[in-house]
Image: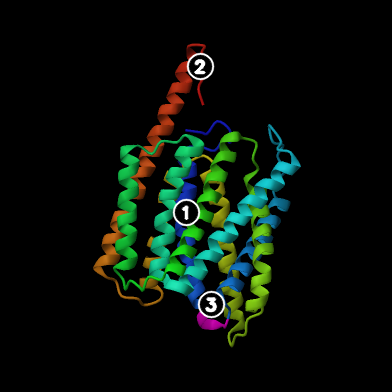
Amino acid sequence: MSHASSGLPVGRGLLYLIVAGAAWGTAGAAGSLVYRASDMGPVALSFWRCAVGAALLSAVRLLRPRTRAAAPVPRARRLLRAGATGAGLAVFQTAYFAAVEATGLAVATVVTLGAGPVLIALGARLTLGERLGRAGGAAVAGALAGLGVLVLGNGGGAVHPRGVLLALASAAGYSAMTLLTRRWGRAGGADHSATTVGAFVVCCLCLLPFALVEGLTPHSGEPVRLLWLLAYIGSVPTALAYALYFAGAAVVRSATVSVIMLLEPVSAAVLAVVLLGERLTAATCLGTVLMLGSVGGLAVAEARLARGARGARDEAERAGEPALT
């Protein structure tokens, strides 16, 4: 069940993505607590999130033993990968926060996370030749239905064209980031930790001018609590989650990645009920069940596909024929 170019088992890649999606969902609750404890704005929060994440990932790279890659990637290509991924990350985060401001959290979330799987499925089919299949299509439809029930069933919001366009731009940034990661993972030789650090550095540089205009240094009556919250946001839903995301997205089909990452609003909804005192509704329960069922179905299908590919390669090797990748 390992991907030929990266060596990471597909099963482990699926686990990485599930953990990353659940961790991403905690960022919203932590961000809400940051807003309660200070006057920090969304762009400044995104900047500090990326800055702390980049610092932590850089420290991990310095401390861990260095391994020599089988096929080193040229420096110019590494810079291009980091720049493209970082730009996609900056568009994804910044356009989403702007969409929330323009049209509300519910509509921005539905459009961004709903359009993401569709754009990724189309992009993967056109650029990577990855077929979604009937089961995958049904899983995507179920996940989108669950997302709609989960978000719109809990209050909804007014739809403003500017906000919808910004949400679509956010979905495009997320889709480009996912498809590029998958393409480079198939090509082999990619150092995912280096790409992640570089992406965060580029994202910080993109966000810094806007964060300075908004106000980079917040005012707070609870500075210790604010620092702990920023440390958590920069470590768990950022450094850890994105490191797992980029590693998993390199070996798992792009459409599957997009659906698994819809675990983010599920974990966010659960935390909203448990930590923030929001009411548990029938829509929350139904949407969560639909989305978790879709994620589980796609994960099983992905694992079966990987086992089938592994079996075909082993059979071809025993027969002395070249294995198809």
Task: Tell me residue 14's x, y (percent).
Answer: 45, 44
- Residue type at the position of mark 2: Glu
Can residue 103 be seen by looking at this rendering? yes
| Residue at mark 2 | 317
Q: Main secondary structure of the magenta part?
A: helix
- Residue type at the position of mark 1: Val
Q: Residues within 10 Å of mark 2 (few under 14, many from 20)?
A: few
The boundaries of the magenta stretch are: 34-39
Q: Earlier in the sequence, mark 3 or mark 2?
A: 3
Q: Residue at x 52, y 34 (%)?
A: 3
Q: Residue at x 64, y 60 (%)?
A: 203
231 left or right of 201 in image: left
Task: Tell me residue 204's x, y (percent).
Answer: 66, 63
Label 1 element class: helix
| Residue at mark 3 | 34
What colour scheme has been applied to the protein in the rendered image?
rainbow
Of all residues, the one furthest to the top in this rendering is: 320
Label 3 element class: helix
Of all residues, the one furthest to the front in this rendering is: 161
